DNA sequence: TATGAATGAGCTTTCATTCAT
DNA sequence: AATGAATGAAAGCTCATTCAT
């Protein structure tokens, strides 16, 4: 019955939960499903979590925390605000495309009105603040248009990335999600409008350190 | 056969459902809650809907259909692709900010993995196609940058609008959502990058026919 | 919508009920099924019957009453107790094989513990008394063995006929049920034991007035 | 894994079910009634049975199986086909009069058209076949009249026994049912007709080992 | 710690019955 | 008399949670 090298039963349960929630959705998933998927008894779950909701809330907190930490690192590795945006986009898309089940969870269950309130709070807010800092820096240095409300910019960029992930999840074809990091950043920075000069794509291409 | 001003009992139930679903979420809402909110008996619901799921699916279909129809009208009233995008943004934000409960439903319950599959199909796809047509037109006339993948553009624009609505819903302050239509379209068209010349904002400002 | 020549709506409903009850069973049948089968509105049923149970009780009473009346006539047409038994067997099997749906109802739903008590009372008791009279007469004239308890004889004969009907209903092949009247009466009168003399079959054969 | 004297929780539930079904009938009985009567929680029932129907079907199968097994033993203990019939009659009546509640169930609920089909199949068929074998043997040895169709004989005998039980159940007086085994077999073998010689009763009286 | 049998509250859905028309 | 939309009580079943082992 014992899986892996054991040891971290809590993580074991969370892994089982991701798989089950992603497949059946939070409400439709039974606690016993999670137990089964995690290879533990039903009762064991309650030694590590207060109740069913605590599982998904912990799950989101855990994943977001790690995601946020790595996002910060990525940003620090980039110099200009523009490169920082690209780094964030890359990280955002890479992280979610690496774990399709986590992605499904985040694009669907996380939106639950009930959960949303109890959750979006801390970690998610931090992520938005991270983005906000980058925009602020860009507007401060004159790289970004200063007349645009910062929250609008943040929400638009996040929303664009978010929708890319959602569409990727719903799509029957399994294209490479990370490849969209550059063009979406390019669009976001350069705008949709055609311009007479200064092709925006070039610049970003130069910064393409991941090919 | 015609009774009172009947015939709208179905609508009555749908209205009750919107209110209840928006407040408690689909799974947490009891059918009897909906009945209570609609002012009918529990059993009456089943004279108009097959089961609980049929209620929310019908709800989404109904609302999306009307939204889509009006979106098409708005677009036809606009000349250039750029003005069409603005029209869509205005309509999108206006429609949802007019009915906060509907907005909540769309930003939360609609994402349910289970419902998503059963639903996102027809009407939602049409909405994306509508957007896609506008982008295509713009790229054809040379107004929009042609090198950007159309689906990426569509998803980014939709995602931006979508996130604006979500943030608005989650925000404690009740700011005017429609006011964001212009700046978000401006950002989307002009890009975040600061530009030496030709300020994009001007143009859009001129097209401001709703002020 | 109007069936037949109308007129007896009560009978119409009872006919619908027989069909529906025979097919789905009393508890599984919906009142609206009966209404549908009878070609009347749900509410109309309650103009003729107090409630669902009243329908089946009335049904049994009606059918049993007619059956009983005809059984009495048949008996009067027969001279000897032995011919009377044969007449009863013939009538019993003929009546039920003529209306398969009624037969199904009687062999299944009538046994309901709940209904049984409320019902078996009057008409069914009369039927047993009719049989009992015949046995009594036979024992009185010396035609039948007097040492056998009358109720045992009555129950055995009725039970045999009853089981023939049940088996006929459950059988996939539609053999002629009435043809069993003579042999079953022969068995009942002559016994299963082989006898050295006086073959019993002959006598009954002679009495075959219906051939 | 073995707990208390457990393992009989299933039997506990079946016992509760017999009591409740016998009193209220299958359809009228609530699952919670059964749970209450069995001294378990409602939900516990579903750990041992798929659903309500599964309870009664299992019940019939269990009882019939045991009844059938014992019937076979009884038969093997008897020499002649005539004594075998008597043994079967005794066993049939004894078994059902020992458990009045089981008897009620068998004489009423078992006839349900809906259940009948799903059930009468295996065990009940075996019982009829057992009887059929005895008749066949008797007809083969010349003890029984060979011109009577075997199925008719089987059905008549079973029907007689069956009706004795039904009447016993419906009767307000609690007479001894097993005492009827001899006279009913006597009637069946010797026939109702009065005979000049060779009284049939004698023989059977000799075999009366139970007084 | 870990187990999983047992619990029982709670929900969706059905359907007999009513009653305004 | 006839209709059938509306009612709402009732019940089967599920499943999160507990707790004796």
Image: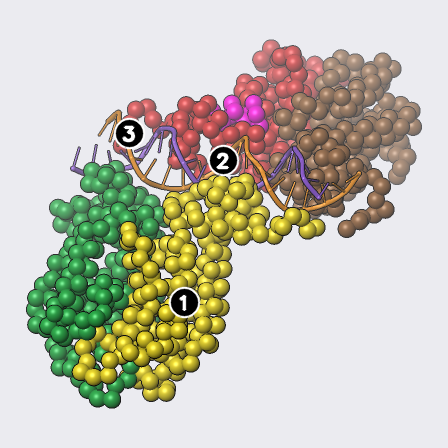
Chain colours: A green, B yellow, C brown, D red, E purple, F orange
Above/below status of B151 relative to D86 = below
Q: Earlier in the sequence, mark 3 or mark 2?
A: 3
Per the image, label 2 sits on a secondary structure element best described as helix
In the rendered image, which quarter contains the C terminus of chain B?
bottom left
Q: Label 1 lies in what chain?
A: B
Q: Label 2 lies in what chain?
A: D
Does the magenta portion include A158? no
| Disc on res. B91 | 1
Cβ atoms under marks 3 and 2 closer than 8 Å: no
Residue at (43% x, 61% y) in the render? B119
Is residue C186 visible to us here?
A: no
x, y percent for residue A210: 14, 75
Per the image, label 1 sits on a secondary structure element best described as helix
Q: Quadrant of residue B124?
A: bottom left
Q: Nearer the viewer, residue B155 or D77?
A: B155
Cβ atoms under marks 1 and 2 closer than 8 Å: no
| Disc on res. D52 | 2
- Neighbours of disc 3 within 10 Å: few (<14), some (14-19), many (20+): few
Q: State the residue position of label 3.
A: D2
Cβ atoms under marks 1 and 3 closer than 8 Å: no
Part of the protein shown in magenta? D16-25
| Disc on res. B164 | none
- Neighbours of disc 2 within 10 Å: few (<14), some (14-19), many (20+): some
Q: CA distance from mark 1 to mark 3?
A: 67 Å
């Amino acid at each position: 019955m014992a899986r892996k090298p054991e040891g971290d039963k809590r993580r074991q349960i969370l892994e089982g939960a991701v798989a089950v929630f992603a497949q059946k959705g939070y409400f439709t998933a039974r606690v016993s499903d999670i137990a089964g998927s995690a290879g533990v008894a039903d009762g064991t779950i309650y030694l590590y979590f207060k109740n069913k909701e605590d599982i998904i809330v912990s799950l989101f907190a855990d994943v977001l925390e790690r995601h946020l930490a790595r996002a910060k690192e990525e940003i620090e590795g980039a110099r200009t605000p523009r490169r920082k945006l690209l780094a964030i986009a890359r990280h955002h898309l890479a992280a979610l495309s690496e774990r399709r089940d986590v992605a499904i969870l985040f694009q669907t269950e996380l939106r639950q009105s009930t959960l949303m309130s109890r959750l979006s709070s801390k970690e998610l807010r931090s992520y938005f603040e991270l983005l906000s800092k980058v925009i602020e820096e860009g507007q401060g240095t004159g790289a970004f248009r200063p007349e645009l409300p910062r929250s609008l910019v943040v929400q638009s960029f996040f929303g664009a990335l978010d929708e890319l992930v959602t569409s990727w999840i719903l799509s029957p074809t399994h294209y490479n999600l990370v490849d969209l990091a550059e063009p979406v950043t390019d669009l976001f920075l350069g705008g949709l409008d055609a311009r007479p000069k200064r092709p925006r794509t070039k610049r970003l291409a130069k910064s393409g350190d991941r090919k």
